[in-house]
Image: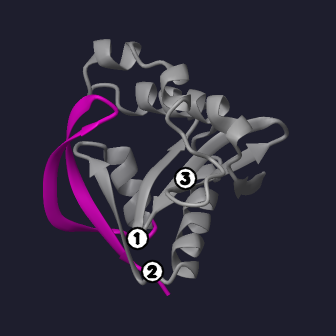
Amino acid sequence: MLIRPAAPADALAVALVHVRAWRVGYQGLLPAAYLDGLRAEDRAARYTFGAETGPATSVAVEGDAILGFATIKDDELSALHVDPDAWSRGVGRALITQARADLAARGVRRAWLWLLAGNTRGQRFYERDGWIASGETRSDVVWGASVDEVRYVRELP
């Protein structure tokens, strides 16, 4: 498996991972009709891979297949998703390690993320990596879905 920066040509493959990860991982947390209506093409059109400014996305690649991705922006881990077929294979661990290194290289000493409330799989993953729930919560609209989220923080070396 290789971790590398996302390129514009990766947009649809990343979006397919994004949609599959949401459909499986957020089942029971978001309305089924909403999850069923997600379209990879809609997400792919919003990505700005390769731009000099804005979010930076890394992808986990095995052969020609993109297994997952992580996106950072400023001092935030704004997304980390792995294709459900690749769960529990170390893809998420490799991506979060790269994301932490990228944040630290930017001079970030305290990173944060928002996690969908009730996402116990995500909670266990981030807590094993040293992220701590800050006690802050918010309601937000993410990709058109109204969600409740919990903020996690992590000190970086």
User: How crowded is the residue under tag 2: few (<14 C-alpha within 10 Å), some, or many (20+)?
Assistant: some
From the viewer's perspective, is the residue at label 2 or at label 3 nearer? 2
Farthest residue toward the right?
A: 63
Residue 137 in which image quadrant: bottom left
Residue at (51% x, 54% y) in the render: 71
Task: Examine the rendered structure and indicate whether residue 153 appears above or below residue 86.
Answer: below
Q: Disc 2, disc 1: CB below 8 Å?
A: yes
Q: CA distance from mark 3 to mark 1?
A: 13 Å
Residue at (61% x, 60% y) in the render: 52
Residue at (34% x, 33% y) in the render: 143
Secondary structure found at label 1: loop
Give 30 or 4, whichever is nearer the viewer: 4
Q: x and y percent of residue 46 in the render?
A: 49, 35
| Mark 2 or mark 3: whose residue is earlier in sequence | 3
| Mark 2 or mark 1: whose residue is earlier in sequence | 1
Q: Which residue is mark 3?
A: 70
Task: Examine the rendered structure and indicate whether residue 111 appears above or below residue 114.
Answer: below
Residues shaded magenta: 129-157
Tell me which amino acid carries mark 3.
Answer: Ala
Q: x and y percent of residue 43 in the render?
A: 49, 29
Residue 154 in which image quadrant: bottom left
* 80 sits to left or right of 139: right
From the viewer's perspective, is the residue at label 3 or at label 1 nearer? 1
Query: Does the stretch in magenta take in 101?
Result: no
Q: Which residue is mark 2?
A: 108
Residue at (58% x, 27% y) in the render: 16
Give 148 or 15, whichever is nearer the viewer: 15
The numbered disc on residue 75 is: 1
Residue 65 in which image quadrant: top right
Tell me which amino acid carries mark 1.
Answer: Asp
Tell me which amino acid carries mark 2.
Answer: Val
Q: Is residue 29 visible?
A: no
